Amino acid sequence: MFFVLANLLIHPPAFAEPHAPHIAIDVRSAKAHAAPSGTATVYRIAGKEEGAKNAFFGVLEIQPGARVPVHRDATEEYLYIVSGAGKITIDGKSTDIKDDFAVFMPAGAEVSFEATGTETVRAVQFFAGQGPEAKYDSWVGTKE
């Protein structure tokens, strides 16, 4: 038995594919991109370019009065509102949201958002699959 364990330590078995690195990051040091309007910023935590393979994870900040225009994403999207207030419309149904609200948007849903409060909306964002985060590629990098 000792020989088997020692041999495994010296010659570990090869795995088909290495695991992606685990990331623990202070959001304030994440790669940040600002919308062309300057009214929103996304902090990229994990997506394709960070080594993630199955989803996108970011933090959004949306300034008071800013609007996210009507759009559709190909994957499900999830938000957790950390702070701020707004009105989200999903497939024609509007809901006032604020801190501690969670939002689910089905793939292909028609979505828009308006930050209605006086403080910046800060939300944790997940896309269940990759692709929709490509919209942030045209945003201006504020940190690299």
Image (cartoon, rainbow, N blue to C red):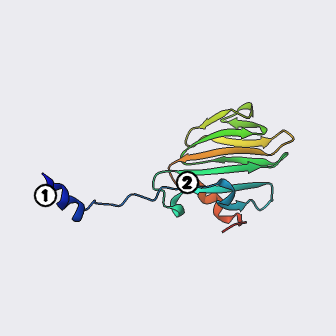
Tell me the tag on residue 24. 2
Question: Within the image, what quadrant is residue 78 found in?
Answer: top right
Q: In this rendering, does residue 101 appear at all?
A: yes
Percent position of residue 75, x then y: 53, 46
Q: Residue at x 64, y 54 (%)?
A: 26
Please state, as top left, top right, bottom left or bottom right, where the C terminus lies in the image.
Answer: bottom right
Q: Position of residue 21 (x, y in %)?
A: 46, 59
Label 2 sits on what residue type? Answer: Ala
The residue mark sitting in front, 1 or 2, is 1
Name the residue at the right extreme. 118
Where residue 60 appears, as percent x and y from the top left, is 69, 50
Indicate which disc, 1 or 2, sits on the residue closer to the N terminus.
1
Q: Quadrant of residue 85?
A: top right
Query: Label 2 crowding class (10 Å Cα cut-off): few <14, some 14-19, many 20+?
Result: few
Dot 1: element: helix
Q: Give the camera-side residue of 103 and 100.
A: 100
- What kind of element bears circle 2? loop
Residue furthest front as drawn: 2
In this rendering, the answer to whether 68 lies above or below 93 is below
Q: Is residue 20 left or right of residue 72?
A: left
Q: Are marks 1 and 2 in contact (CB under 8 Å)?
A: no
Give the alpha-carbon distance from disc 1 to disc 2, as whole Å.
37 Å
Furthest residue to the bottom?
144
For badge 1, the amino acid type reads Phe
Which of the 4 quarters of the picture holds residue 83? top right
Q: Is residue 11 visible?
A: no
- Image height of 26 relative to 65, above or below: below
Q: Which mark is residue 30?
A: none
Residue ID for mark 1: 3
Q: Position of residue 97 (x, y in %)?
A: 74, 33
Answer few, some or many: residues within 10 Å of disc 1's Cα (few below 14, many 20 plus, some between 14 and 19).
Answer: few
Q: Is residue 13 left or right of residue 1?
A: right
